Image (spheres, rainbow, N blue to C red):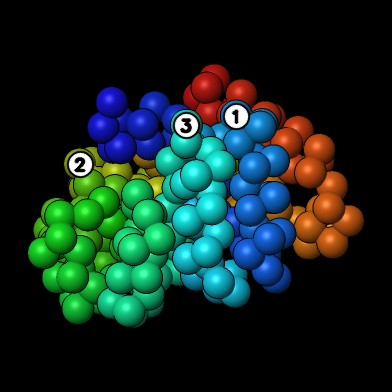
Amino acid sequence: MSLLQRILEQKLVAVVRAESAALAIDAAQAAFQGGIVLLEIAFTVPQAEEAISRLRKQLPQAVIGAGSITTPDQAEAALQAGAEFFVSPHTDPQLLQWFQQRQLFYMPGGLTPSELMAAWKAGCAVQKFFPASVGGPAMLRAILQPLPFLRPLASGGVDEQNALAFLQAGAAALNVGGSLFRKSYLQQKDWKAIESASARLVQLCKGA
């Protein structure tokens, strides 16, 4: 199964942000135990590449990616660490070219039709709709009416309460982070809470 097929089937990519690589690894493992297969480690995590490398070894059945990529140097570090997909909060021509040349699976971010189309024209099979909470499901639905071929990854403010609405509006998949890896969960190392929240999201996406 191709990576695109897995994203479209799972409809869920967990983005991990934490204050250390060790916390990010434990949080990602908890999400995987809850059934989330696609795990994105944000490059705002200190030593994110170390977390990616270790998770590739520890969770061979998961798909480990790198998020919050803003420079080619970060992209190279993520690639060397073994990242299998890459995500940015924005659309940057330099980064688009970097990923195009290497034929890597890249999901750049955009909120407007112009930004999302730029990503699609550059060959990105999935486009990150970010920050999704700004326009909400209504904006996404409006964008997709004239551009139904886009495959948006709804990201930013997506949680259990609005997840179904984004999927019904046409999101190809959801990018869930803050509502899943809450600061209180991470501070208390409440991995069972993350596992349970992950399981609920997985079930929600399966039913959509």
Amino acid type of disc 2?
Phe
Q: How crowded is mark 3: few (under 14 residues within 10 Å), some or many (20 or more)?
A: few
User: Is residue 49 shown above or below 207?
Assistant: below
As drawn, is 91 to the left or to the right of 159?
A: left
Could you tell me residue 110's position as x and y percent? Answer: 34, 65
- Pair 2/3: label in front: 3
Please report the residue visible at 55 percent of the width from the left and 59 percent of the height from the top.
51
Tags 2 and 3 touching, CB below 8 Å: no
Calculate the distance from the C-alpha at mark 1 to the C-alpha at mark 2.
28 Å
Is residue 161 in view?
A: no
Residue with the mark numbered 3: 61
Give the structural element (helix, strand or loop) at label 2.
loop
User: Which amino acid type corresponds to the residue marked 1 in the rendered image?
Assistant: Gly
Is 197 on the left or on the right of 208, as rendered? Answer: right
Q: Residue 149 — which label?
A: 2
Near mark 2 (Cα within 10 A), the count class, few <14, some 14-19 or many ≥20, is: few
Disc 1 crowd, CA 10 A, few/some/many (<14, 14-19, 20+): some
Location of the N terminus (image quadrant): top left
Residue in the foreground of this view, choosing between 42 and 21: 21
The amino acid at mark 3 is: Gln
